[in-house]
Image (tube, rainbow, N blue to C red):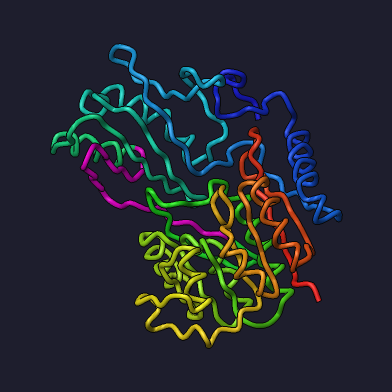
Amino acid sequence: MKCKHFGECGSCGLYELSYDEQLIRKTKKAKELLRPFYESTISAFSSPDSHYRARAEFRIWHNGDKCDYAMSNITKNGVVMISECPKVITPIESRMWEMLKLINTSKLLSHKLFGVEFLASSLDEVLVTLLYHKKLDDDWLKEAKGLEAKLDISVIGRSRGQKLVLSKESVSERLVIEGKNYWYMHYEGGFTQPNPAVNTQMISWAKSKAKSIGHGDLLESYCGLGNFTLPLSDCFDKVLATEVSKRSIYNALENCELNGIKNIDFIRLSSEEMTQALSKKREFNRLRDIDLDSYDFSCVLVDPPRAGLDDDTIGLICNIEHIIYISCNPDTLARDLAALSQTHEILDAAVFDQFPHTEHIESGVFLKKRV
């Protein structure tokens, strides 16, 4: 990927390295962190070099009557106006510049606009959220509907205490995992994996590990909208998947219905609450229709935030035979493996390059309980 803003825009920091060099660098760092626990090969899953990001946020910078897209600069002490962004997927790129032109021709749309958020899918659906420092009225609504029609997008307007959904607040996505289609609804404001191509590889890797187990039930914590849950459910008799966000649980249930999957129970519990419930330390009304004793967990999948796992969750999952750990922070992964390696050994590890041209590393490890 080439971008005229390399060296100025703070979004991409590894612009001086070729993409192959970036992937080698990230894999080397992952190997160093995992070396105390694992010395075998680490698989590296690459991203498209450009047009890979399905989520993007831009500031709007006003210069007189003209609006520009802006990003924080590389030193994080100011902004840089941008006129291209080759990392966004084609459905976003094909619309964002024409949209900016249209916004600049409308005082209603441009006035007090301070940010734009894009959410897109590989099915050429694009959701645009326009962020304002003003109350949005019927005149704005009429202009924004014209923007929707001209660009074939869905628009949401947001200001303090106000959210206007013009047509819909989600995009449809299809992921093909091992030749099978899985359908998802991705909602504005919800967490979605940013790189569809690498996400598909990540799910496929996790599913291959799940298939190798061949028995029992799956426990999943931090399940989100069911990104991993739906494809992996094929590999188990039953699945108990938990997530703290009520909105994500509703989204996961909708996605489950879209795919006609019947063996998953999605429950709104935090990781800590899940641990309390399964260890019989606390009862939850949300579990009144769930017979926890009926589950025979042969595998647990965790995909925690950057802070990693809490001690109680580690104490719980170290009793489960197999662990699939997806990590967005190799440092906290290494910290957690120091505890998990007391009871489990790593059978496989991988790096997934969700964020090319940055130092960010997404990784996965597959562990089995020691005999």
| Image quarter (top left, top right, bottom left or bottom right) of the N terminus | top right
How many labels were placed on the picture? 0
| Image quarter (top left, top right, bottom left or bottom right) of the C terminus | bottom right
Indicate the position of residue 45 as horizontal and vertical percent values. Answer: 72, 49
- Residue at the farthest left position: 138
* Residue 249 sits in quarter: bottom left
Indicate the position of residue 35 as horizontal and vertical percent values. Answer: 82, 50
Q: Is residue 229 magenta?
A: no
* Residue 48 sits in quarter: top right
- Residue at the farthest front position: 281
The residue positioned 64% from the left and 66% from the top of the image is 179
Q: Is residue 164 magenta?
A: yes
From what the image shows, is residue 110 above or below residue 323?
Answer: above
Of residues 88 and 318, the one drawn nearer to the viewer in this rendering = 318
- Region in magenta: 151-175
Q: Is residue 1 left or right of residue 37?
A: left
The residue positioned 67% from the left and 45% from the top of the image is 331
- Residue at the farthest top position: 64
Q: Is residue 57 left or right of residue 42?
A: left
From what the image shows, is residue 67 above or below residue 219?
Answer: above
The residue positioned 60% from the left and 80% from the top of the image is 217
The residue positioned 52% from the left and 39% from the top of the image is 90
Of residues 215 and 89, the one drawn nearer to the viewer in this rendering = 215
The dominant secondary structure in magenta is: strand
From what the image shows, is residue 225 above or below residue 51?
Answer: below
